Image: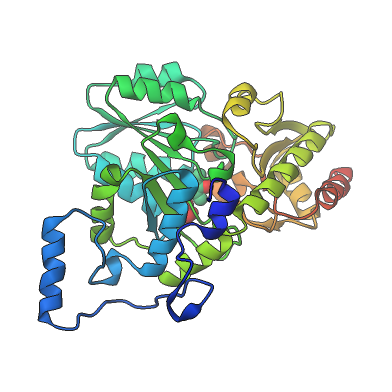
Amino acid sequence: MAEHNSTRAVHAGEEKHKPDHTLTTSIARTSTYTFRNTAEILAFMQEKADSGPPYSRTEYGRYGNPTQSAAEHKLAALEGGERALLFASGMAAVSTTLLTLLSNGDHIIISRDSFYQTREFAETLLSRWGIETTLVENDKPEAFAAAIKPKTRLIFVESPSNPYLRVADLPKIVEIARANKVLTVVDSTFATPINMRPLEYGVDIVIHSATKYLAGHNDLLAGVVIGSKQTLADIGTARGLLGGITSADDASLLMRGMKTLDLRVRRQNENGLRVAQFLEKQPGVERVWYPGLASHPDHEVARRQLTGFGGVVSFEIKGDFEKTGCFVDSLQLPFIGPTLGGVESIILQSATLYSLDPLERKLAGMKDNLLRYSLGIEDADDLIADLEQALAKL
Ligand SMILES: *Cc1c(COP(=O)(O)O)cnc(C)c1O
């Protein structure tokens, strides 16, 4: 019945007939679960001994929650996966997954243009536990193949990536991974299941920062890992040990946000393309990075792989650090800050939050004039008029 993601976003994961005849799924705000008597505890323990997770109930909030479980079922349906695990943030999802799947002596390949904290986690923490990281260019499958070593366990790709919206050729990367018996994990935060469903390409695990498009209203932090029951079993156990589970309140807000996911992302795809096309024609703009533009290096792959190009446009102002800051300050509609994917437009001059030291920024390849503009669901004409007046002041 729910064959399309717009329908799944509304209905999947939630029982039609709920306790107390409510339409919405209620918030199970509880830290623990109780048993009627000792026999019930023993029957629960017997179930755990007889079958693998997920179990029909849990005994404590760190292992699960009915509200969170409903949100997980919706997410699994949207991505076409067997099972989803919700976490307290995108980074809790990334770190728990990597800590579970990697061991001392292992090697991981990560696409170079990807979320800064993912790379930082690998390079500062995983390295301390004897796990080696190689960064490779997102757009070069042959570089992934060349980087594989005997101890490579996992390829982690972000697509489209942050901030340059690089799109990786997932079928090719999956082929390389399978030939080498290596797992593939895709951070699909920028795509959402509306624009791309990596599991259909044979990817093993999909991760999202649900803080962004999935929740969509800039009012919570959450992360999700989606894949087969078997692949996710150990990650689920690790979540209970590391403790980064999402709260029932956040799961409920996330579920509410996801009902409009399809509407929001379609509008954001439209806004992204309109704004990118506008910016590309402006003399005050040095370069626009948007996979929907023919000028983007991965446009061809993006056309094959994405059904929408997303709501984030990165662009470079013709000017230095200060001039770019002045441009941002002239804009009237967007908020200024990190994060993306919400209904409110938000812009960030990435260099400002990276470092106060120009040399450090330069060494890291962080461009002073680069802006990441996450378009919200406002009207494209208004967003463009706002950019136009700010560009006129340059
Ligand atoms: C934001 C983000 C993350 C981290 O998610 P949090 O919810 O902030 O912890 C990971 N990957 C990508 C691509 C992101 O944009």
Q: Residue at x 34, y 24 (%)?
A: 177
List the single residue furthest toward the front: 1
Q: Nearer the viewer, residue 299 or 6?
A: 6
36 w.r.t. 131: above or below:
below
Q: Is residue 181 left or right of residue 359?
A: left
213 w.r.t. 166: above or below:
below
Query: Could you say where residue 174 lies in the image, as x and y percent from the top left?
Result: 39, 26
> Which quadrant of the figure contains the C terminus?
top right
| Residue 58 placement: quadrant | bottom left
Q: Nearer the viewer, residue 164 or 93?
A: 93
Q: Nearer the viewer, residue 234 or 241?
A: 234
Query: Could you say where residue 315 lies in the image, as x and y percent from the top left?
Result: 70, 37
Colouring chosen for the image of the structure: rainbow
Query: Could you say where residue 369 lies in the image, as x and y percent from the top left?
Result: 69, 39
Q: Residue at x 60, y 51 (%)?
A: 6
Asked whether residue 92 appears in the rendered view, the answer is yes
